[in-house]
Amino acid sequence: MTTSRIKNKISAIVSSQLPEFVRNENPIFVSFIEAYYKFVEQDKNSQEIIQNLLLYNDIDSTTEDFIKYFLSNYASILPENIIANKKLAIKRIKDIYESKGSPLSFQLFFRIVFNQEIRVNFPYENVLIPSGGNFLQRRSLRVSTGSTTLDSVSDLTNRFLRVTKNNQEFRTPIIDVRTISSTLSEIFLDVNFLATSYDVNDVVNVTDATESGGNVLFTGNIEPTTVTVTISETGLGFKKGQIYNITADGGLGTQILVNNVTSVGGINEVSFVNFGHSYDNDFNVQISNDKNVPDSSLVGRIINDNTNGFLSHGNVRHTANGQILSNFGSNTSVSSSGTSTLSDNTKAILNFTLGALAIFPGEFTTNKGFLSEPDIRLQNDLLYQPFAYELVTGLDINNFKDIVLDTIHPAGQRLFNNRELSDTLDVRSSVSTTSSDTLTLTLFDDISNVDDSGFTIARILGAQLVDETGTIVDSGTVASDEQSYFAETYVVNQDPTSADSYIAGTTETF
């Protein structure tokens, strides 16, 4: 047995402590004394214990044989054959005692004893309670920062936003703050203590007092945001659940959700997902069923008249391949001809108005009152009752039931186990792949055969496949008697690159 736990060994100096005649006349006796001290200096023997008494009393430095005494003194609820590190278990046992009966105590206990991660469920949380759904309808203001002495605008949370209306001061608790930019924040208010009204450009402030007076910590102005939306053109082909980001007149941040559509996909109900900022005036937008928002305003706008033409708001120009084909005057009705059409009744038009207080759509924060929810159950006298809890583990209940009931089980409760069985399967395939040369398609310039009068009688486009080394691996020609072009109709005072296209991919025969 080693003596590594002590440094000052008596056996190393015992011979020097004996008289010289004893050492000379009785060498066997000296060897015996040295052997004796080497024996008592071995780990866990008397001399080693005396010298390291304080170390034995420290859980971090004690020996494995002494851990059982710590377990009996401080953690008698734990079995001696626990899987986890025993020293760690003893140091954390206080946490289990202090949190006994809580989900934390179960998680710590199973981690220490069984080296298992578990979850604790309380099934009564999913019991049907009539009218038990908590309904929340948030309110928020966009406020620009005038001055502040706070380190961060987020420090406004749990303070009171003050605004004066008709010589009366209203103090509304601030629930949350979202930073939009360095000079603009969204402040969420307690719906139970709102002012009678809020208006754009109202001055608001926050002080360090809960009542009147106090030192001003923050001052700002209420900025406009989108507050209502109406539908003037329903469009076609939209789908329920589509979300649109609305950017118009320099403003942004508004998100619209399509709540309901007609049988042909026309929008008949929308709601706000988020309210925007930096808008100057009320505005209209036109949206496409492909989730695009082509334009931001109906100023200078082509509006479908639901027949075979359109109504123009502004001078309208129709082009094809960059060449102007037609011009139409302002506020005129234009009909299409032939097989082409200038109408586009697939787009919807939404009208937005601005205001101060954003009112979010109401939402239920719990589903306890919804009988149709798959997780909601009727109360019974077993699992779905107030005095039952469920452990979600990978263990059989017989492996831990007795020890849990004797240690951390709360009195008056009923224990259930929801066992999760899992395994890892190797589904990797053994398919190998082989890479080949990259082939590039190259096209030749147009080749025209011209007769004596200069008239083109043939048009050929050459094509070839070239590998990475430049070698031609295949070639041919592309010939067609059709020419495709892009046509569009747009308002003259708009940028044509962002205008709505009413004829796209038109093909003509030549």
Image (tube, rainbow, N blue to C red):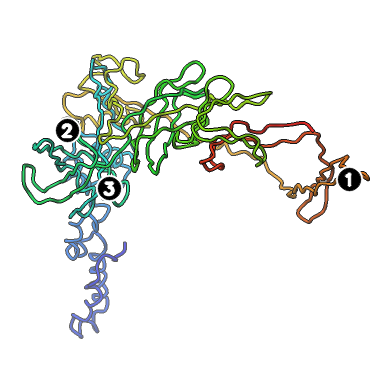
* Residue 347 appearing in the image: yes
Alpha-carbon distance for marks 1 and 3? 99 Å
Could you say whether the residue bearing mark 1 is in a helix, strand or loop?
Answer: loop
Q: Nearer the viewer, residue 509 or 132?
A: 509
Query: Which quarter of the image is occupied by the C terminus?
Result: top right
Q: Amino acid at mark 3?
A: Lys
Question: Which of label 1 and label 3 is nearer to you?
Answer: 1
Marks 3 and 2: in contact by CB < 8 Å? Answer: no
Closer to the chain start, of discs 1 and 2, is 2
Q: Amino acid at mark 2?
A: Leu
Q: Please give left or right for residue 152 compared with residue 433 in the image.
A: left
Q: Residue 393 is drawn in which quadrant?
A: top left
Instruction: Give the residue pinned by disc 2.
Output: 194
Q: Is residue 436 above or below residue 265?
A: below
Question: What mark, if any, has residue 380 been given in the picture?
Answer: none
Question: Which of label 1 and label 2 is nearer to you?
Answer: 1
Closer to the chain start, of discs 1 and 3, is 3
Q: Badge 1: few (under 14), some or many (20 or more) residues near its Cα, within 10 Å?
A: few
Instruction: Give the residue pinned by disc 3.
Output: 86
Residue 476 in picture, x, y percent from top left: 84, 43
| Residue at 57% from the left image edge and 32% from the top image edge | 328
Residue 474 in picture, x, y percent from top left: 83, 45
Q: Amino acid at mark 1?
A: Gly
Instruction: Give the residue pinned by disc 1.
Output: 454
Could you say whether the residue bearing mark 2 is in a helix, strand or loop?
Answer: loop
| Residue at 19% from the left image edge and 63% from the top image edge | 52
Q: Is residue 469 above or below residue 51?
A: above
Q: Is residue 469 above or below residue 209?
A: below
Alpha-carbon distance for marks 1 and 2? 82 Å
Q: Please give left or right for residue 373 compared with residue 69 in the image.
A: right
